[in-house]
Image (cartoon, helix red, strand yellow):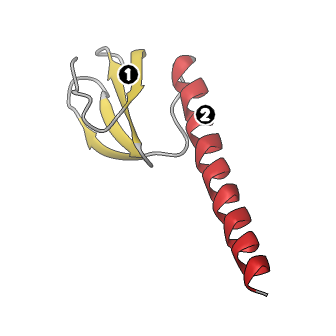
Amino acid sequence: MKKSYFKYVFIGALIAVLILVLCFLIDFVRVSNLEHPIFCKRIREYWDGGSYECYGLFYKVNAYADGFNHYDRMEIGPYWMEFRP
């Protein structure tokens, strides 16, 4: 009985890690195509035309906009990545 319990816990943890990796990969591909990420929360917005920072689980996205709400550059990286317009 004890071995089956650990087996289920291991499978559950593995599925959770795979879901987190999948969420990161989806946001990574969207940011690479200059689209807004899905699985992160906007934390800070700037008054320069729409630039913002958003945080996902274990990553951060910086989106830089020109004055016309058009995003010309997006970065994805760790939490300590600086916002450099």
Give me the residue at 51% from left, 31% from top. 36
Residues 62 and 5: in front is 5
Of callouts 2 and 1, the N-terminal one: 2
Q: Which quadrant is the N terminus positioned in?
A: bottom right
Name the residue tied to disc 2: 25
Percent of width and height locating residue 78: 35, 34
Q: Is residue 48 left or right of residue 19?
A: left
Figure quadrant of residue 27: top right
Percent of width and height locating residue 40: 46, 45
Give me the residue at 57% from left, 17% from top. 33
Q: Is residue 43 left or right of residue 1?
A: left
Q: Is the residue 58 above or below the residue 68 in the image?
A: below
Name the residue tied to disc 1: 69
Percent of width and height locating residue 23: 60, 43
Secondary structure at badge 2 equals helix
Q: Is residue 64 left or right of residue 35?
A: left
Query: Is there CB contact under 8 Å for labels 2 and 1?
Result: no
Structural distance between the alpha carbons of marks 2 and 1: 25 Å
Give me the residue at 73% from left, 84% from top. 2
Residues 21 and 42: in front is 21
